[in-house]
Image (cartoon, rainbow, N blue to C red):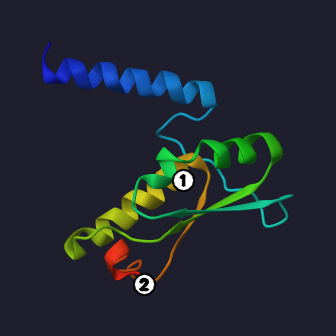
Amino acid sequence: MSLEADLARWRDHLHRFAALLGNPPDAGVAAAPETAPGHCLVFAPHPDDECIIGALPLRLQQEAGWRVTNVAVTLGSNPERRAARWAELQDACAVLGFDCIPAGPDGLNDVRGDTAE
């Protein structure tokens, strides 16, 4: 198979999976209002982690009407990519219906085990 055919199959798979959630990947979901019955904070240590670990927050949002806010702890280790990573993160959160805030202007730097002290 060609790369183009593989990508088309993958996109089709993602669209079918998103349809199960009731949210096509190209459309955003409005975040829950301030008056939601609960509020879940997701502290994503790295961009994309909100999507990888987002099943429970997504369930709380969809089944219990909770508001979900992703706190972007870091925006990656490459300073030149941080603005693009922030834009990608905001897009991903819009698809999930999560609010998104950074932990600092550029996220937190040097968040690693060896810098904990």
Q: Where does the N terminus fall, quadrant-wise?
A: top left
Q: Which residue lies furthest to the top in this view?
A: 1
| Residue 117 position within the rendered picture, expressed as x and y whole percent measured from the top left | 40, 87
Q: In which quarter of the image is residue 63?
A: top right
Q: Quadrant of residue 23?
A: top right
The residue depicted at 41 percent of the width and 81 percent of the height is 116
The residue depicted at 67 percent of the width and 56 percent of the height is 31
> Can the viewer see residue 95 in this picture?
yes
Which label's residue is closer to the chain start, 1 or 2? 1
The residue under label 2 is: 105
Indicate whether 15 appears above or below 44: above
In this view, the residue in front, 94 or 111, is 111
Q: What residue type is labelled 1?
A: Ala
The residue depicted at 40 percent of the width and 71 percent of the height is 74
Number of numbered markers:
2
Q: Which amino acid does label 2 sit on?
A: Pro
| Residue 20 position within the rendered picture, expressed as x and y whole percent measured from the top left | 60, 24
Q: Which residue lies furthest to the bottom in this view?
A: 117
| Residue contact between numbered discs 1 and 2, judged by CB atoms under 8 Å | no
The residue under label 1 is: 94
